[in-house]
Amino acid sequence: MDKKLRVTLNVRIQHPGSRMPRQEFCGRVRTAAATTTPKTLTFLPMTVSLIISTYNWPRALYLCLDSVMQQTAMPTEILIADDGSGISTRDVVRHFEAVSPVPIRHIWHEDKGFRLAMIRNKAIAASRCEYIIQIDGDLILQRNFIQDHMIFAQRGCYVTGSRGIITEMLTRKVLSGEITSLTPLMRGVRNSNNAIRIPLMAFLYRTLGPTRFVKGCNMAFWRNDLIRVNGYDESFCGWGREDSELAIRLDNSGVRQRCMKFRGVVFHLHHGKCERNSLSANEERYQQTIREHRTRCEIGLTRHLGETDQTRTPKPEVKIPVPASAGH
């Protein structure tokens, strides 16, 4: 189990050519070395897109992307699914485009309210990879996060993970630089059992634990499975239920849920609640999908896809050696 997730803060980024004044973004997210290392890790041979949804919180996005840069296994590409943010978010993305070892693409549309389902569909359509890991831009990733998802991936399944929640006070201290390290059991980390990484417990939980929770901030899918169910239902506008409704359609189409806990660890920065004016309407759409046993939505991913998207033949599982620094 990792003993510590270390955060070194107060990194200044200067944005040449920006119309906005210089800003300080809190950065450098590091995780401590793992205590045990297997000789080989079993992966499916696949390409991986990391999709990060964001809206007008550049400091949090900076921390999130910085934690991605320090992963033990990198995705093939990173897509920022931006629901209409301003120029400060664009500047953060440009900074990481210049330093990232993998391509970063900024998928943006105009701010016309909370349209998370649509911007995620646009990012999925833009993805060039077989497997998609989906997170929100207000998460700090433990350094094995991508590797854990790659290990956990299985054909015919989608993955739902959990999150450790940071309180408002601790979030302020992290963003200001007053706090320079995070541990699962420190004061200010709520539901710390979601922030502890224990691979053996992850195996037991996968076998014996419950299988009905969905957090859109930490999920993973095969892209072709998303195409089959037409991705997110874009009739969901405003906060709530679009991720749970997608999971129901995946279940109905025969794609099994796999719950990942004690692996794929993330820390969720505190923020105010989104407006929930549309929650009752979204709840009704969700219940209708359950009642009608739907497998596809009408307004979804296909409206953003090119004509070249075709189902790929699954590839056999292989064992890939990993360096000692990338272990458990």
Image: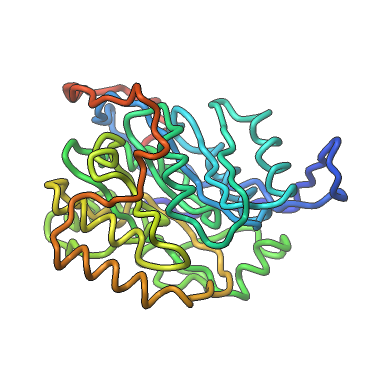
Q: Residue at the location (16% across, 22% down)?
A: 316
Q: Residue at the location (28% across, 60% down)?
A: 245
Residue 57 visible somewhere in the drawing: yes
Total label count?
A: 0
Query: Residue 90, image x and y in percent?
Result: 69, 43
**Vertically, is 182 above or below 122?**
below
Who is closer to the viewer here, 75 or 226? 226
Q: Residue at the location (53% across, 26% down)?
A: 102
Query: Residue 50, image x and y in percent?
Result: 45, 39
Asked whether, in this view, residue 322 is left or right of residue 109, the answer is: left
Where on the picture, by quarter, is residue 57? bottom right
Who is closer to the viewer here, 274 or 318? 274
Residue 325 visible somewhere in the drawing: no
Who is closer to the viewer here, 47 or 74? 47
Where on the picture, by quarter, is residue 55? bottom right
Asked whether, in this view, residue 48 is left or right of residue 199, the answer is: right
The colour scheme used to paint the residues is: rainbow
Q: Quadrant of the C terminus?
A: top left
Query: Residue 4, image x and y in percent?
Result: 50, 54
Q: Residue at the location (20% across, 38% down)?
A: 154
Query: Residue 81, image x and y in percent?
Result: 52, 45
